[in-house]
Amino acid sequence: MTNVESLLPFNPGHCFIDGCWQPSDSTDSIVLHNPSNAQALCKIAAGNSVDIDNAVNAATAALNSEWGRFSALERGRVLARLGQLVTENIELLTTLETADVGKPLTQARADALALARYLEFYAGAADKIHGETLPYLDGYTVYTLRQPHGVTGHIIPWNYPMQIIGRSVGAALTMGNACVLKPAENACLTALLFAELADRAGLPKGALNVVPGLGDVAGAALAAHAGVQHLSFTGSVDVGAFIQTQAASNVVPVTLELGGKSPQLVFNDADLQEALPFLVNAGIQNAGQTCSASSRILVQRGVYEQVLELMADAYKNLKVGPADQDFAIGPLISAAQKARVESFIKMDTELTLVAQGTIVTDAPAEGYYIAPRLYACEDPQHALAQQEIFGPIQVVIPFDDEAHALAIANGTEFGLVASVWTQDGSRQMRLAKNLHAGQVFINNYGAGGGVELPFGGVGKSGHGREKGFEALYGFSTLKTVAARHG
Ligand code: NAP
Ligand code: MG
């Protein structure tokens, strides 16, 4: 049994509410498992509606006490200290994420570094976001104030806990909101450590509260709570739609980030050697459990066979194994997620399996491993080319010309990210404008994850933007002040 409990500087069975670790109102607990070997890691609290109520009350009180009185400069400074503490604890965060989420060490460390970078970015932005003065009638002075919503609820998934905490909680705190965070039931440890670090950084009590627990108990209570003034959700379309109905009942704004079926468009004139690592990595990073995973590769017929060959060679070298051995691909998060991906593989009958990666022989049989699969797919309407699988599976679809490529690219219900590989500048501009996506990349994919770059979807990929300054607008409300002075 991997013993993570001895590494934790807090009691993992508690919730972090009002600046201290508290036992949950519920007597239930949840056992966390290591996805690499299915062994139990530790027990966490199964928070309930009473815990959520306590957390929302603590957040509300924080807005009316020390945290509410913090200047923008002070908010920036505390976030900078928190970023520093995250940096000092990179190895512990990496170890916990590798054990809890099954992330290969390099990818877990990259997430911890990204969390620190979000805090650094938002720390610097805190005192640089401001309202405007507006020209108006003679005798008036009009200006706008950017103010926090109040209490913000954050319901996050298991695939990138640290990065999503950085981009949502980081931005919300920057604008002076008080946060209640409900991490995923199977990926809690770094969220809990983040609360401990925030406390050590000097974040006033109640500004951040973390209640672990089940989605349909703690998550649902947070989504429905009348004391929450903004909801931020990342996860599945069905739960996102439910969260939006809850937000509607309380008439509060909601940000939804719901994944996608993001395409890369490869034209005959593309530099294939440049493109190759992006084509593959964007599909298999985090075992494909990435909202912005590129699960569809669209290739012009002139280079279709060549791209299939290049990608196949790369796939044959892909190794899958225990996260602490740091292969390119680790296990999936859970037995349920593995079963979901296998159910898609069962639907592959009309596709051609071009290549597969390899699960290393000493990977524990109990772990949730899936070998990555690369398919040639003539039918863009096939289930594997339409639905979000959230596993290491890519389909390669041929196209004839630009119009055909655009129709296929825009032909799903999603629209999160897209990329275009071509040397033709006019084509780059046309496609950047016409692709249905919140982010378009030209001759790259993901731009290294840039925390500065606004991110979010269209269609069933959701709405609202996180990352960059845009997140700060989303996590604040604008007040117009008109003074008549003659
Ligand atoms: P999910 O159910 O949407 O979970 C996301 C978050 O919502 C978790 O914290 C979850 O809590 C919580 N939640 C679940 N039911 C809730 C409810 N009724 N009210 C409030 N909160 C609730 O996603 P999943 O079941 O983990 O994964 C299913 C599929 O969703 C995946 O296969 C993938 O296709 C997609 N997904 C997308 C993303 C993304 O980044 N866009 C992330 C994860 C999953 P618990 O986990 O504790 O139940
Ligand atoms: Mg779920």
Image (tube, helix red, strand yellow):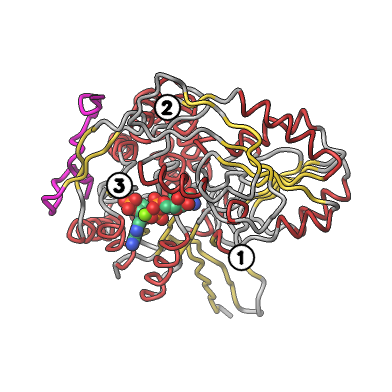
Q: Pointer 2: what residue?
A: 87
Lateral position of residue 451 relative to residue 223, left or right: right
Sequence order check, earlier mark of 2 and 3: 2
Q: Nearer the viewer, mark 1 or mark 3?
A: 3
Looking at the image, residue 92 lies above or below residue 400: above
**Residue at x 40%, y 45% (from the top left corner):** 339
Q: Assess whether mark 2 and mark 1 are in contact (beta carbons under 8 angstroms).
A: no
Lateral position of residue 462 relative to residue 180, left or right: right
| Disc 1 to disc 2, C-alpha distance | 39 Å
The percent coordinates of residue 52 (x first, y second) are 23, 58
Residue closer to the observer: 232 or 399: 399
Residues packed near mark 1 inside 10 Å, few (<14), some (14 to 19) or many (20 plus)? few
Which contiguous range is marked in magenta? 1-28
**Amino acid type, callout 1:** Thr
| Disc 2 to disc 3, C-alpha distance | 25 Å
Sequence order check, earlier mark of 1 and 3: 1
